[in-house]
């Protein structure tokens, strides 16, 4: 028996289907970044108003939006 790792390769998509997947991924990146910008604005306004209860959840949500957008962007680059 060999000790080589099992490699599972993803299927190669036809060009029109790959283009659709990339377009959808980039659309979600735009949505995530728009949501992130909105959350950062709300966190800043809340901090300036003194409503500190909204700041931490907004920052966490913004970080999650960044992570999702970054992951989708990396996936889109790998598929291109």
Image: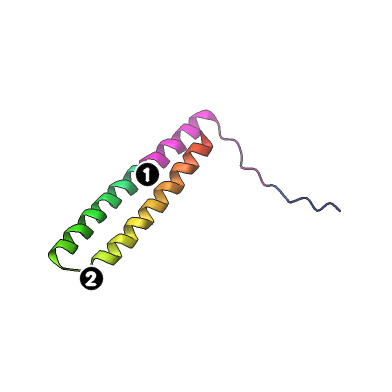
Q: Nearer the viewer, mark 2 or mark 1?
A: 2
Label 1: few (<14), some (14–19) or many (≥20) C-alpha neighbours in 10 Å: many
Q: Nearer the viewer, residue 63 or 75?
A: 63
Q: Which residue is mark 2?
A: 53
Give the quarter of the image for residue 46: bottom left
Magenta segment's dominant SS is helix
Whether residue 21 is in magenta: the answer is yes
Q: Position of residue 70 (x, y in %)?
A: 42, 47
Q: Nearer the viewer, residue 23 or 73?
A: 73
Is 12 positioned to the left or the right of 74 in the image?
Answer: right
**Please, which residue is most extreme toward the left here?**
49
Label 2: few (<14), some (14–19) or many (≥20) C-alpha neighbours in 10 Å: few
Q: Secondary structure at mark 1?
A: helix
Q: Residue at 84%, 51% (x, y): give it.
A: 2
Q: Which mark is residue 75?
A: none
Q: Residue at 30%, 60% (x, y): give it.
A: 59
Q: Which mark is residue 29?
A: 1
Whether residue 12 is in magenta: the answer is yes
Q: Position of residue 43 (x, y in %)?
A: 23, 60
**Please, which residue is most extreme toward the top here?**
15
Q: Position of residue 13 (x, y in %)?
A: 56, 35
Q: Nearer the viewer, residue 75 or 11?
A: 75
| CA distance separating discs 2 and 1 | 28 Å
**Please, which residue is most extreme toward the bottom here?**
53
* Boundaries of the magenta span: 8-29
Query: Which comes sooner in the sequence, label 2 or label 1?
Result: 1
């Amino acid at each position: 028996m060999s000790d080589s790792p099992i490699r599972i390769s993803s299927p190669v998509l036809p060009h029109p289907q790959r283009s659709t997947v990339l377009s959808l991924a980039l659309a979600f990146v735009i949505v995530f970044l728009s949501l992130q910008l909105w959350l950062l604005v709300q966190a800043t306004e809340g901090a300036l108003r003194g409503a500190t209860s909204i700041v931490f959840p907004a920052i966490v949500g913004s970080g999650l939006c960044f992570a999702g957008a970054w992951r989708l962007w990396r996936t889109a680059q790998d598929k291109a």
